[in-house]
Image (spheres, rainbow, N blue to C red):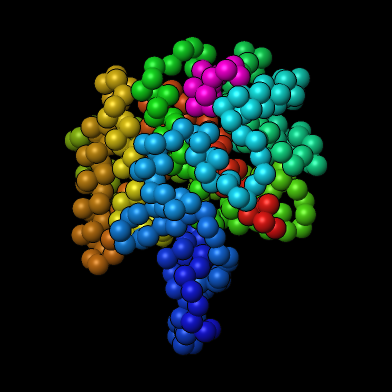
Amino acid sequence: MSDRAWLWCWNGSDWSFWFKCNVMSKQDDPIGLDRAIAAETVLSHSDPESGQLLIRGYSLESLVQENSFEESVITLWQDVLSAELSMASLGQARMQVWQQFRPLQDHLKGMRPVERQRFLLSSLSETSTDPVLILAAAGVSAVLAMQENISNCEPDPSRSHADDLLMMIRGAESDQQSIAALETYLIAMIDHGISASTLAARVAASTRAGYVAAAIAALSVLQGPLHGGAPGLVLDMLDEIGSGEGIVPWLTAALDRGDRLMGFGSRAYRVPDPRAALFKASLWKLPEACRARLPLAEQVETTAIRLMAERKAGHVIQTNVEYYAALLLDAIGVPRQGFTPCLLRHERPVGWLMPANSN
């Protein structure tokens, strides 16, 4: 393989921008799709060594500090997707899809949340080409998928996207810190290279299956525990540990069994995931009652990294995005059954639609 520029390459479980494909000897032959070149992109770039994440040339930190979710979507879609997006248009789209989803209430009985979300999204017209409508449908279907009675979750088009979704989840007004925390989450997860789910969207779109089919294909891939399915398992782990006294015995036993510790390890970064730091900072801004898990979680994080480093010298395993994503969503009132992958990645169609449009 000849020397190539910096491109998106498969690194085993995720497509990352950091790998430069060089001439490889027979001994260096990759396994499966490892090191296969996927595509060039202008959307985002993550550096595994520094932990920097750029989205359309902006640092993740500046994007979160200076933009709303709606403004961030406009930035990502600029010059690529033709869509009139604003807080008002996204609000109207939420109401439109809710009215379409509401009569389907009886068909959702007995389904798991992710099955509900796929079912609701599949009710959209396969010829739909409005990115704003599909983005709204992803958010509304994510919320409705975790509710027993979707008739009680009517959107308010006058609210921001983050505010309205939290209102629909909680059924009550939310404090500004919780709204800001959800908005931080939505922006931080808006795009992260060509992940397995984004690749699925690209493959579906390459057959001209349409935006809706591409989004459903990506969502189906996303639910896997090695992609978007880990956050709920992070909380399960913390529940089982219980207290500070249980940290070392629980982690030691898990590592002795060869279990994977959910919330740790990433092929995209050799340092802590930059999104995890943002979520942790957002957690500390919430009322104390909302972040009761945080002190234990920090102790578990520190101990887990130390124990893994002792067992695997030279192989650094750091906190990944799922760890503090789980804590943040739990703290603002998102039910655990809605983590995987409903609300956890409902904003990802923002990025999924870009390669779908290109194809």
Query: Overall secondary structure of the magenta stretch?
Result: helix
Residue 351 in the image: x percent, y percent?
57, 47
Quarter that holds the C terminus: bottom right
Query: Can residue 27 be seen from the camera position used here?
Result: yes
Between 331 and 126, the residue placed more toward the observer is: 126
Count of marks, rendered view: 0
Residue 83 drawn above or below residue 183? below
Residue 194 drawn above or below residue 301? below
Between 249 and 40, the residue placed more toward the observer is: 40
The residue that appears at 39% across and 46% down in the rendered structure is 60
Quadrant in the rendering for residue 316:
bottom left
The residue that appears at 76% across and 58% down in the rendered structure is 207
The residue that appears at 44% across and 35% down in the rendered structure is 67
Between 308 and 22, the residue placed more toward the observer is: 22
Q: Is residue 141 magenta?
A: no
The residue that appears at 67% across and 27% down in the rendered structure is 93
Residue 56 in the image: x percent, y percent?
48, 51
Magenta residues, as a range? 156-168
Q: Is residue 37 found left or right of 94 in the rendered image?
A: left
Query: Can residue 112 be seen from the camera position used here?
Result: no
Residue 265 in the image: x percent, y percent?
36, 54
